[in-house]
Image: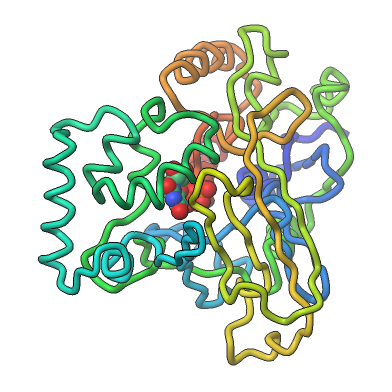
Amino acid sequence: MKYDYLVVGAGLYGSVFAHEAKKAGKTVLVIDKRQNIAGNVYTEDVEKIHVHKYGAHIFHTNNKVVWDYINQFADFNRFTNSPVANYKGELYSLPFNMYTFNKMWGVVTPQEAQEKIEQQKREAGITEPKNLEEQAISLVGKDIYEKLIKGYTEKQWGRKCEDLPAFIIKRLPVRLTFDNNYFNALYQGIPIGGYTKMVENMLEGIEVRLNVNYLDNKEEYDALADKIVYTGAIDEYFEYKLGCLEYRSVRFETEVLDIDNFQGNVAVNYTDAETPWTRIIEHKWFEFGKDDEGNDIPKTVISREYSSEWNLGDEPYYPVNDEKNGELYKKYKELSMQEDHVIFGGRLGEYKYYDMDAVIASALSMCKEELKG
Ligand code: UDP
């Protein structure tokens, strides 16, 4: 049987496409080299807790179309992300808000906080921020940069803040209010029942083959379909012939503890340079609030997260979207344009630091083009 589409990768991009293609009357086969669907949003049940096996994923978006779309496949809870920063035992509220400024400087009013930031910015003499360090100091001043940003960022990216692009830190809100919601998004939540269930619903009625490595048997798989939607790494597709794009990888040390509450929050970021992990995630708090029955679970599951440079064979997580990699990606992109039976999409296929909602938006816009008529 020849399919209309072969989708390589059962993550969000591939699953949205597969769902839409099937709806449009196309035949689709989805393959994935992992033993599970859902890509990096995969959640696994441990002690009735949905563990985010490939890192914390909190769905948040301002895009109503995307929000309505994803709500077809799951109900979302009212989870709001408010991480805590732990700097050598001092706890600070994140993102940067009045609680953070009060703890850092003792300031009480927004005016006082603003003045303190302005003063530190003046002292640093930055007019046009050229890199992450300058951008961060311009946004929140030197003290916060040094205690809450520098160590964490350099651990996470394995690069000096002076050598990182400014846009990365602009992901974080800075607020002169007591709102400690990490995201500036209208809609936010965690799919009840876990992300795996949500993706399962997207792929309902679609043939999925797991433990299958497309690139190992490319010709054989290419022959199965008229067109390929490829969501793996673009440089790997071309056998790294122009060189490797850089990624950051993440390693998780996950433990089940015989206590019901380890840190009282989903995320605690360790923002000093010495602690080897970047953050600890306590998975039960994604889904259970203090009044929920899940709070009775006598155990808890935590993951310490270690960031590292990606080497061949590791899982690629974060594209390093700096100038050098941007140039190389452009060249791969040109090569990919010549593969007219293949659509490259998703975080790895487009080498882009995508949030989940942006991946879905990108997949939906591709579907519109590809499946029209
Ligand atoms: N960041 C920081 N301190 C923190 C949390 C984040 O300096 O406690 C910086 C860091 O550079 C990070 C960026 O903000 O790469 C974006 O953080 P975000 O939480 O969006 O990263 P993600 O959740 O994608 O890992």
* Residue 154, image x, y percentages: 49, 37
Left or right of 35 on screen, residue 123: left
| Count of numbered circles on the image | 0
Position of residue 48 in the picture relative to residue 40 (left or right): right
For image coordinates 79% across by 76% down, the residue present is 48
The answer to whether residue 275 is above or below residue 291 is: above
Q: Is residue 249 above or below residue 338?
A: below
Q: Position of residue 233 (x, y in %)?
A: 66, 27
Foreground: 165 or 195?
Answer: 165
Rendered view: 355 above or below 66: above
Quadrant in the picture for residue 198: bottom right
Counting from the top left corner in percent of width and height, residue 91 is at 45, 66
Residues 24 and 75: in front is: 75
Viewer can see residue 290: yes
- 201 relative position to 361: left or right: right
Image coordinates of residue 274 in percent, x first then y, are: 56, 45
Q: Nearer the viewer, residue 27 or 17?
A: 17
Which quadrant, please, contains the N terminus? top right
Q: Residue at x 26, y 27 (%)?
A: 130
How was this image coloured?
Answer: rainbow
User: In this orientation, does residue 373 appear?
Assistant: no
Q: Camera-side residue: 144 or 40?
A: 144
Q: Residue at x 48, y 65 (%)?
A: 84
Most distant residue in the top direction: 241
Query: Looking at the image, which residue is at 79% across and 72% down?
Result: 257
